[in-house]
Amino acid sequence: MELAAIPFEKLHANTFSLWDEQWFLLTAGDFGQQHFNCMTISWGSLGVIWGKPFVQVAVRPVRHTFSFINDYPEFTLCAFPEQYRKTLNTLGSKSGRQMDKMHTSGLTPVKADLVAAPVFAEAELIFECRKMYWQDMDPGHFLSGKIDQCYPGKDYHRIFFGEVLAVRGTDRYQ
């Protein structure tokens, strides 16, 4: 699949569909050291903050990927064609603590252009990001009691903001 650089302000995508229907594979760690993990996510946002393009992702501390995104300064987000939906479902529901998700997924991690975390050869849209802020979710700030029902284990997400350093995608996103 041929990917081209896309200036953030020229990105053409339905962000609601990207998050809610297509999903992203969040990957953090270091490709060169072969020390990284990934997980499928469907919660997040894209926008501008502090004059910079950013993505916002939410990761629960109980997830294996949490230690990677928490400890490493960079991460990537990759979106895939529909044919990878089953693979993304597995990568979002199985833990890297209990299985080698990379080898069983059939996806091909490759070196990113600007960050240490890998991207995937099969991706059709890639964001390379550097963390710029994090915040632990505070249930005392929920304005609806229904939100807390999403956390029966009280394992509230940590929110990470990543400055978008590079975007690459197929002509679908240009």
Image: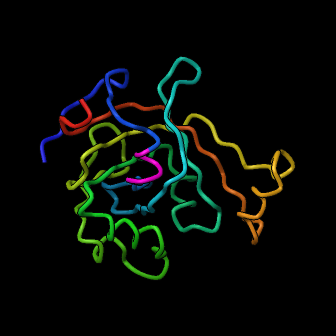
> Residue placed farthest to the left in the image?
2
Q: Residue at x 40, y 52 (%)?
A: 24
Q: Position of residue 120 (x, y in %)?
A: 26, 54
Residue furthest right in the image: 140
Asked whether, in this view, residue 61 is left or right of residue 119, the answer is right
Q: Residue at x 74, y 49 (%)?
A: 137
* Image coordinates for residue 133, horizontal then vertical, percent: 62, 36
- Place of residue 38 in the rendered image (x, y in percent of width and height, measured from the top left): 42, 61
Colour setting = rainbow
Please give the name of the residue rendered at 13% of the width and 48% of the height, measured from the top-left corner.
1
Quarter location, residue 30: bottom left
Determine whether 132 is above or below 64 in the image: above
Residue 167: image location, x then y, percent: 32, 34
* Closest to the observer, 147 or 154: 147
Using residue 171 as the reference point, say whether residue 152 is left or right of it. right
Q: Please determine whether, in this image, residue 143 is positioned above or below residue 47.
A: below
Q: In the figure, residue 104 lies in which quadrant?
A: bottom left
The residue closer to the viewer here, 115 or 43, is 43
The span shown in magenta is 17-22
Quarter where residue 166 is shown: top left
Was residue 119 drawn as part of the magenta stretch in this picture?
no
Residue 3 falls left or right of residue 21: left
